[in-house]
Image: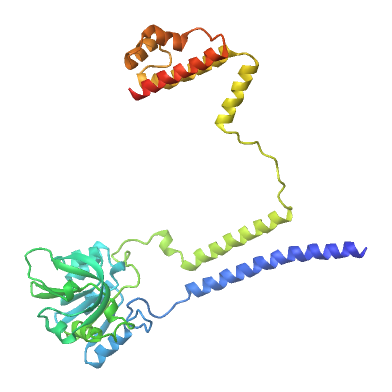
Amino acid sequence: MSTAVGATITDRWRGLRWALAAVVAIVAVAALTTWLTAPRPGGHLDPTSTSSDGVLALMTLLREHGVTVVEAASIADVEREAREDTLVVAAQTYHLYDDDQLRRLAAAPGDRLLIAPIGKTREELAPELRRAETTEFGGLAPDCDLREANRAGTVQFGIAETYEAQGSTAVTRCYDGVLARYTDDGRTITVVGSEQFLMNAGLAEEGNAALAMNLAGTHPRMIWYAPQRSEGGESGGAASLTDLIPAQVYWMVLQLILAVALLAWWKGRRVGPLVAEALPVVVRASETAEGRGRLYRSRRARDVAAESLRTATRQRMLPRLGLTPGAPPEAVSQAVAARCGLDPQTVAHTLYGQPPDTDADLVTLARALDDIERQVAQS
């Protein structure tokens, strides 16, 4: 009696254990969802971010030196704030690829500073430059006559792109081309192939802060535009159905899928362990051929064996000879003889002759067929 009760308690605990595991997994996914979807201040090259890849330190230095810093969150903000005495800084250009956005940004007044632009952004906003190479730099000296670079001195760029002139426009190249500047219709356009030197983490290295200040602080007003997401729908297009679905909905669906999967797995375990079942044995082709040969020999079926060899040989040779499976024996024999330079009668006897009388004759036939097939394949 006590044994039966103990077994029942054990079974119940086993089932409860998997149910608790499923609940814990769902709670863990819910906690992860909350953490991932919770809003966080700042981002990559965000002017308000204190993280290592933010630029709050640079924004603070610029404001302390009397520069009016405008933090633009959209193209519309740039268009509204840009003036002739304004420097427009475009960073985080991975989200800046829409043709309409680029045209609108190119039409904004004022000088322009591009920070590590992607190819499409550079082609639209700095069309007179092309990328030369991408490499990792240590401390680089300016080696140019640009005042902002010479005042900064040596700079640590890390991995950076270098630029060169696209056409006949005069381009000033500093730091082996990491910094390039030219003038287009009275507008100064500057491109820097690295963003590391102006981040919070890299600003204190050598002349990084000086170069960042000299480039971004050349005007009394500076617009910092580093989009943290794409603005593809801003130009007036209607939002799609997926755009209207909150991001949390996808995580809820993922939780439901995980819960159903765990429930199905738990139910499957209650059925019991898998039962081993004997499956058919896989036999190699060589063993099959050897077994058939022994069978033919035991039954003295030399005629069947010979016909099998001849049929298989003809089927493999016909495509090489350009003949169809229904080709007459005379045509096959003539084609083989012409291909191999053999006597047509000998070929016909080998391919269509009488069955061998002895096992030795069968072996001789097999060798002759193999020799003919080899000559056809090699000719």
> Measured along the vertical axis of the image, is residue 353 above or below residue 77?
above
Q: Which of 179 and 295 is in front in this view?
A: 295
Name the image colouring: rainbow
Q: Is residue 328 visible?
A: no
Residue at 26 percent of width and 83 percent of height: 70
Where is residue 3, by image quadrant?
bottom right
> Left or right: where does residue 151 sit relative to residue 359?
left
Q: Can residue 230 be seen in this view?
A: yes
Residue at 46 percent of width and 9 percent of height: 352
Q: Which of 278 and 117 is in front in this view?
A: 278
Where is residue 30, by image quadrant?
bottom right
Residue at 31 percent of width and 73 percent of height: 227
> Measured along the vertical axis of the image, is residue 332 above or below residue 24?
above
Locate residue 168, reporting x and y percent: 6, 65
Q: Nearer the viewer, residue 159 or 128?
A: 159
Q: Nearer the viewer, residue 247 or 153?
A: 153
Locate residue 239, reporting x and y percent: 37, 62
> Measured along the vertical axis of the image, is residue 59 above or below residue 44?
below
> Measured along the vertical axis of the image, is residue 266 above or below residue 219?
above
* Outermost residue to the right: 1
> Left or right: where does residue 163 sit relative to residue 118?
left
Residue at 59 percent of width and 30 percent of height: 287
Locate residue 230, reporting x and y percent: 33, 67
Locate residue 47, reporting x and y percent: 32, 82
Q: In which quarter of the image is the N terminus?
A: bottom right
Q: In which quarter of the image is the C terminus?
A: top left
